[in-house]
Image (tube, rainbow, N blue to C red):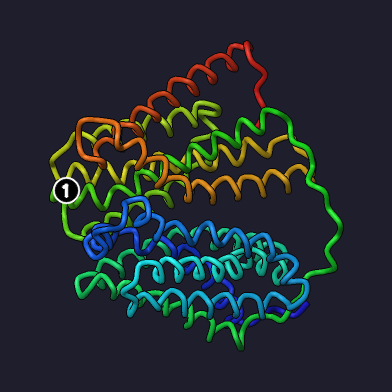
Amino acid sequence: MSTPSKLTTVSILSLSVVSGVTTVITGIIPQLSHQFPNVTPTLIEWVVTSANLSALLTLLLNPRLTQRFGSRQVVISGLLLGAIAGVIPLVLTNFALLMLSRIILGFGIGLFSPHAIGLIAHTYQGDLRARLLGYQTGLSALGNAVLLVLAGWLVVISWRAVFLLYLLLGAVALLAIPALPATKDAEPVAHQAASLPASRWVLLALTFVTYLLIWGVQLKLPTLFTERHFGNASVMNLTLAAMNLGGLVAGFTFGRLHHHLHRYTLMLGYAGAAVSVLILWRTQQPLLGIVAAIFFNFIYSYTGPYLVFTSQANLTGNQIDTMSSRITIATIISAFFAPLVWNGLGQLGGATLTTNVLGWIAGSLSLLTLLTGLWAWQTSKGHLTHVKS
């Protein structure tokens, strides 16, 4: 196999840079609420998360589409569809059409995002493949952080200007047209989902709850910043960018931390997140609120890798594939349910909706800390069977 060109490598890695484009509008939630005052907070927040859910459809269809048309055609189609749907809100004034454009954006993302890893596996071998897979993880977090910084600059011009960032998908498509390898997957083998042990369904439920909580915090932060005058939309986007970099640091240090703490790693993630959200719930100090938000994303980012790592331990090949698919579905549908769950619970309490939501999240994280701490202690004493990871 000949060595791919540098342009091909850049083109493949660029897919990771734009893989998190759905969240770049998180910081303009208050502006959307002001623009559409008759729309409920749940629907406003679904503008951010709806693309994640619609992406699930094309994610599930992706293997068949790739087998029929080839990864190059599927990736380019997804990028172009995402670019067009993503930039359309620049001129839309109808909320229903805005929501529709976000759903179509998700279809495009579901077409190209799986190939950020798949093309590396198909195109490279040995140490180079391993190195590029490492780059892929880092570039995903770094790319999202950079996009949020750019959103922070563009929102100074207008909240609509943030949607210009979706033109980057078109730029990546233009790069992909001459550079991506024209490959097709082998004929799909009939595959039946493997059955999973009961303990893994518990981990799947915990994964859903874990991501439901992080979505609750991220979706409410922009409104919190507005209500408590922590900063304008530009400051909010820069904070979201710093939160992503905190997650990147956690990802790089997870292996070493898990080596020392083992099953207590999960408890640490929930405990640190609970403290951070309690600070956000109470503080009126902008700097403390910003630091708490960044620390939240850093410490909470230890929970995801732990759940994935533990859930796949001691499984067969088919079971690993099934578990990976279930985890992906759990994380995606959590984005859909988050606005519904938290805005419903936010009605219960004596403060503003945002403050009430943070109170519920802090309480949930505190409960998870106690439960996972008890579980870790009991397994360390041999009272429970622990999945060796």
Q: Classify the position of the N terminus by image quarter.
A: bottom right
Q: Is residue 158 left or right of residue 101?
A: left
Residue extending furthest toward the front = 38
**Residue at x-position 61% and y-position 84%:** 179
- The residue where tag 1 is placed is 227
Q: Position of residue 282 (x, y in %)?
A: 19, 33
Q: Position of residue 276 (x, y in %)?
A: 30, 36
Q: Is residue 246 above or below residue 161?
A: above
Q: Is residue 155 left or right of residue 92?
A: left
**Residue at x-position 41% and y-position 62%:** 144
Q: Which of the 4 image quadrants contains residue 275? A: top left
Q: Amino acid at mark 1?
A: Glu
Compare residues 144 and 129 and report the one nearer the observer. 144
**Residue at x-position 63% and y-position 65%:** 58
Q: Which of the 4 image quadrants contains residue 74? A: bottom right
**Residue at x-position 24% and y-position 65%:** 35
Q: Position of residue 343 (x, y in %)?
A: 34, 42
Q: Classify the position of the C terminus by image quarter.
A: top right
